[in-house]
Amino acid sequence: MRKALVVLATAALVAGSALTGSAVARDRNRVELTANQIVNQLDARTARIKADLRLTPEQEKNWGGFESAMRDIGKTTADRQIAMQAERAQQKAPIDIIEQLRRKAKFLSEQSADRKTLADAAQPLYASLDDQQKRRFANELVGLSRWPDVN
């Protein structure tokens, strides 16, 4: 019994260190996306949302505002992400904690404005959806609020 416990604990430690090591390596080797790739990803997600909702012709009238807001937010998000990548590449010294706080505050402020724009654009569409569509749309909006996270 004791040997089995030791073997199990050792296996858990080895597996945990392997997972941690791969996460570190994955982060270090992360491929930086181009602005077009970022915009294309968000455009594809927007198209998938529309397909999943199966809008009626009446609901379709409210889609344009949401789609336009998504496209605009995708472009600004891509620009922000490319700017951050360029800043990281040029950075030689460690980031000053005060500067890091300022950058994070600026990012959150911009992200807040984007979310308000998206909410304003999504409201007419959301109001026209039935209960099942509203649930699907709400799930997508929650997912969008987590993507992308540029820090």
Image (cartoon, rainbow, N blue to C red):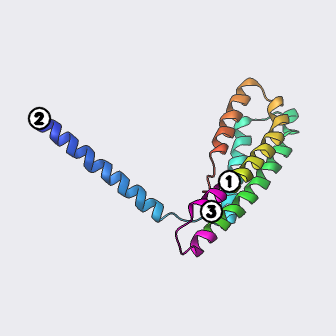
- Numbered circles on residues, count: 3
User: What x and y, as percent, mark residue 147?
Assistant: 63, 49
The residue under the point 58% across, 69% down is 88
Residue indicated by mark 2: 2
Q: Quadrant of the C terminus?
A: bottom right
**Most common secondary structure along the magenta stretch:** helix
| Residue at far front of view | 98
Closer to the eye: label 2 or 1: 1
Q: Secondary structure at mark 3?
A: helix
Most foreground residue, 62 or 94: 94
First along the sequence among labels 2 and 1: 2
Q: Which residues are magenta?
A: 86-104
User: Which disc is residue 151 wearing?
Assistant: none
Residue 54 pos. (x, y %): 75, 35
According to the picture, the residue beneath numbered tag 1 turns out to be 105
Q: Which residue is mark 3?
A: 99
Amino acid type at image mark 1: Ala
Disc 3 marks which amino acid?
Answer: Glu
Mark 2: amino acid = Arg
Give the number of the mark in front: 3 or 2.
3
- Residue density around tag 3, few if under 14, some if 14–19, many if 20 or more, within 10 Å: few
Q: Is residue 33 above or below residue 148?
A: below
Q: Residue at x 83, y 40 (%)?
A: 120
Answer yes or no: do the residues labelled 3 and 2 have beta carbons within 8 Å? no
Mark 2 Cα shell of 10 Å, populated few (<14), some (14-19), many (≥20): few
Query: Cα distance, mark 2 to mark 1?
Result: 52 Å
